[in-house]
Image (cartoon, rainbow, N blue to C red):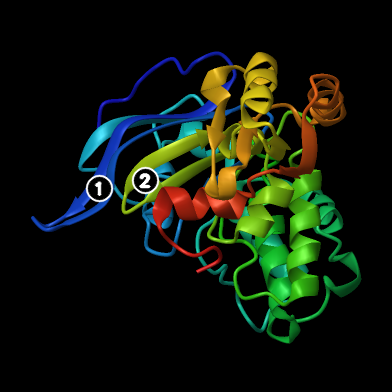
Amino acid sequence: MTVVTPTPAGAMVETHGLSKRYGDNITAVDRLDMVVRRGEVYGFLGPNGAGKTTTLRMLLGLIRPTAGSAVVAGAEPGSPASLERVGAIVETPAFYPYLSGRDNLRLLATYCGVPFARVESALGQVELLPRAGHRFSTYSLGMKQRLGIAAALIKEPELLILDEPTNGLDPQGMADVRGLIVELGKGDRTVLVSSHLLGEVEQMCTRIGVIQKGKFIAEGTIDELRGAATLTVRAEPAETAMKVLAGVAGAENVRVVDGGAYSVKVDLARTAEINRMLVQAGADVTELTSRERSLEDVFIELTGAEAGL
């Protein structure tokens, strides 16, 4: 793999044409171009089987790409220079069931060459100190996920990569892990989190990339992906309404929808102003309804998949 250096200013992850094929017929990831910036919580969103985990495995050096290049934390994926700055959970975290949470992390700290003091700090960050002395086998699924995150934190990484961290959790467990990720993403630390759950991504992430069948199909903030809000207007006479609306939002942002109403792309803060202008122009307004596209609308439009599947 050809390594691209340096990354753009402030970038923690950058890929160019990153691809992974298995045999002649299966393309798991297809020419992925992605940039994750320092200090953001980046949501890697896509249906199950879209190529998310394969991508994360390549970024961590667990598998080699077929083509393309990547830089992770300023170095080649999987290299010591990269891994010392990265903490990760890929799929389900595994620990020794007969050891306590604390002892599991101490063993890991020994392998990583970090002091035991970081074990206590990481347990505190994920709020597991009260149960740190209990065997891993007694932990709930949510506690196991939090211990996995603690394991990823003991190196005090600049970049945290989490693969479906709320998968399989009950609503309270999901809320706990979600809140934890939001806290971990504050400051300079970067968090790259993959998920197929729209509600989770929407509440955690500052920017989102969408992958479908191995192809990267969209990227941006939630507001950018949603696009402009729309205002549905019904008013008579039609000519007067169209003239006012085109003057406010631009003719290219006004279209006629079913039943003769107008759909207007406009800042919803201008709704009262638009109503006033229509009335002053002599139009009778019978409907003025605002609507913002949800992330679910965008996801279905982009992928053709139902949210959360």
Residue tagged 2: 58
Instruction: Give the CA distance from mark 2 to mark 1.
Output: 9 Å
Give the position of the N terminus as an image quadrant. top left
Mark 1 Cα shell of 10 Å, populated few (<14), some (14-19), many (≥20): many
Q: Residue at x 79, y 19 (%)?
A: 281
Q: Is residue 307 above or below residue 157?
A: below
Q: Element at badge 2?
A: helix
Residue tagged 1: 20
Q: Is residue 276 above or below residue 54?
A: above
Give the side of residue 189 with respect to residue 71, left or right.
right
Q: Residue at x 11, y 58 (%)?
A: 25
Numbered tag placed on residue 156 in the rendering: none
Which residue is nearer to you in this view: 41 or 64? 41
Residue 222 point in image, percent of width and height: 64, 39
Quadrant position of residue 141 = bottom right
Q: Residue at x 45, y 38 (%)?
A: 218
